[in-house]
Image: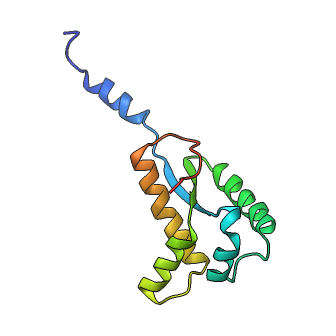
């Protein structure tokens, strides 16, 4: 009988599984800031201003239970390609969607909490 899985044990195991929501935060490299700023003029004036705000947002999201925050690096080339392909401006809502998409991909490839930003 010890080789059989008990139904109540299965439920116990299922209940202990945590469901984590992956959230992406758009992240930029300092060395690309001038290019990114030209593509996304609605961003803060300086990289340091943007970084302070982005870190506060990421910290706030990370403090929510059941959330895994991934800083998803969006490159100037990615933003340019998206803008060219869609003919639309790369505003905050778009950057958030792109970051979330990249974060989900990262999490599916290597679901490790506390990952560093994607190096894509």
Q: How many marks?
A: 0
Residue 82 placement, left or right of 116: left
Residue nearest the observer in this picture, 14 or 74? 74
Residue closest to the far front = 31
Identity of the residue drawn at 50% across and 69% down: 98
Is residue 94 positioned above or below 106 on the image? below
Q: Answer with the quarter of the image where residue 40 lies.
A: bottom right
Residue nearest the observer in this picture, 2 or 84? 84
Quarter holding the N terminus is top left
Residue 80 placement, left or right of 30: left
Residue 45's x, y, as percent? 79, 77
Identity of the residue drawn at 56% across and 50% down: 67
Residue 49's x, y, as percent? 80, 68
Residue 26 placement, left or right of 44: left
Identity of the residue drawn at 50% across and 63% down: 100
Residue 87 placement, left or right of 45: left
Residue 74's x, y, as percent? 56, 65
Tell me how the rendering is colored. Answer: rainbow
Residue closest to the far top = 2
Is residue 98 positioned above or below 9 on the image? below
Identity of the residue drawn at 46% across and 90% down: 87
Residue nearest the observer in this picture, 7 or 62? 62
Residue 5's x, y, as percent? 23, 20
């Amino acid at each position: 009988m010890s080789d059989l899985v008990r139904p109540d044990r299965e439920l116990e195991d299922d209940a202990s599984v945590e469901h984590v929501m992956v959230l992406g935060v758009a992240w930029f490299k300092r060395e690309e800031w001038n290019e990114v700023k030209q593509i996304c003029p609605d961003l803060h004036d300086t990289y340091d201003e943007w970084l302070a705000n982005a870190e506060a947002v990421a910290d706030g999201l990370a403090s929510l239970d059941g959330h895994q925050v991934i800083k998803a690096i969006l490159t100037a080339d990615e933003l340019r390609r998206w803008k060219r392909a869609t003919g639309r401006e790369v505003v905050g809502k778009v950057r958030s969607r792109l970051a979330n998409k990249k974060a989900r991909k990262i999490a599916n490839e290597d679901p490790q909490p506390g990952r560093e930003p994607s190096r894509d």
